[in-house]
Amino acid sequence: MQIVLLSGGAGKRLWPLSNELYSKQFLRLLKREDGSRESMIQRVVRQVQNAVPDVSITIATAREQMSLIRRQLGNQVNISIEPCRRDTFPAIALVSSYLHDKCDVSYDEPIAICPADPYVDEDYFLAIKRLLTSIECGASANLLLMGIEPTYPSEKYGYILPTGRTEQSPVHAFKEKPNEELAARYIENGALWNSGVFVFRLGYALNKSRQLLGSASYEELLHGYADLPKISFDYAVVEKEESIVVQRYSGTWLDVGTWNTLSEVMSEYSIGRVTMDAACSNIHVVNTLSAPVLCMGVKDAIVAASPEGILIADKDRSSAMKPYVENLHTPVMYTEKSWGEFRIIDTEPQSLTIKITLTQGESLTYHKHERRDETWTVIKGRGWVKLDGNEFAVAEGQTVRIPRGSFHTIRAETLLKVMEIQTGEDIDVDDKIVWGL
């Protein structure tokens, strides 16, 4: 059995904590029983492993998120990398070919495709296990879906109309996101929310890839990915499939894609350096800055502060922030990497100051820049620098100057914190040449 988690998102609706590299599923805002905090994707993977311990997990994601996934999940998952964003059908075709060609998964293997960031109980993944078992035992339908029993007439979701009200029923029709009145009518007739869960044998997806994309070869799909059509799996496959069954699910299922919905599952009213007076009510504050945040008399609001900006929003209005965030054009100021994390401290037209934190034993790639010079100052810990082939130890207080054109890297002997100052007339993230690539 295989479970594939689709991890995407552009990080607009949970600004300023989320961004293009650090989208909502990676925010460590959910408190565990031991008091530590985890992200939504960490929570989902933990739940999958508890509910279906023998399953293999693969994350389908963009190249930009690969390092972050390794940072949060280590080597407990496989990763299928999408060269660019092309919607869910190309993503599912690519990960299916990856499983077959690179992981030797057979045509008959049951596969479940799921979003990477639902807020659910472990019962959700036990229900997915039942779908996988149905496929394994020879389900009569080609494609199985998970439908969520609606709790209100939502305009945000597509609807699945089953032929009956049993746990598993053939599908009669699909309906796009309706208005509230039409949604209420669908619900009266037993309609279910479309959860984005698809279960089938691997060969089913490979055959669809051949039919609709002209290939099921991983290498061919990977190298031609940018030319594939932007089309959803629902539109390309599901709505045209005649042999399809939906399984009802009535447990916890929340789409925590806005600050308002996320605050409903947060067990803490404040995270970070936050002070609230007694007149505050129904307020959630998340502060990732070193500076304190003081709230007085604030009601029904979200306050979020990060290096990328500060949000103060009425909870009900927070879901409408996306077009405003798109007009801000803020650069990525913080993200996690497989080796640690970086935070931009200051930006000037011809200089950039970054605080780099490397986990013990980790290192940066061995690389050079053509249009900028760099200076490293160690502010905590010990490590080793390699500069144009020469290696030497560094410790707190020491500074290393790196001229443009010089290959360089740093490895953390202990937890290592470094201030990096970049100077040049054309500072660009694309100005990076990695040794050996």
Image (cartoon, helix red, strand yellow):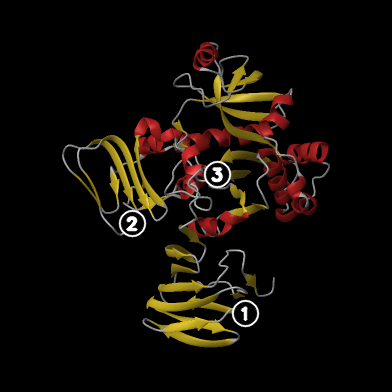
- Along the polypeptide, which appears first: circle 1 or circle 2? 2
Percent of width and height locating residue 148: 52, 26
Quadrant housing residue 302: top left
Disc 1 versus disc 2: nearer the observer = 1
Which mark identifies residue 289? 2
Could you give the CA–CA distance between mark 1 and mark 3, rounded to whole angstroms? Answer: 35 Å
Quadrant housing residue 70: bottom right
Compared to residue 76, the image places residue 401 above or below, namely below
Compared to residue 146, the image places residue 303 above or below, namely below
Q: Amino acid at mark 1?
A: Gly
Disc 3 versus disc 2: nearer the observer = 2
Q: Of helix, strand and loop, which one carries label 1?
A: loop
Whether residue 237 is visible to the viewer of this picture, yes or no, is: no
**Rendered residue at 78%/40% (across/down):** 209
Label 3 Cα crowd, 10 Å radius (few <14 / some 14-19 / many 20+): some
- Along the polypeptide, which appears first: circle 3 or circle 2? 3
Whether residue 247 is visible to the viewer of this picture, yes or no, is: yes
What residue is disc 1 on? Answer: 405
* Screen quadrant of the N terminus: top right
Label 1 Cα crowd, 10 Å radius (few <14 / some 14-19 / many 20+): some
Q: Are marks 1 and 3 in contact (CB under 8 Å)?
A: no
Left of 347 or right of it: where is 142?
A: right
Which mark identifies residue 9? 3
Percent of width and height locating residue 352: 47, 67
Furthest-left residue in this view? 278
Left of 335 or right of it: where is 208?
A: right
Say which of 26 and 16 sits in front.
16
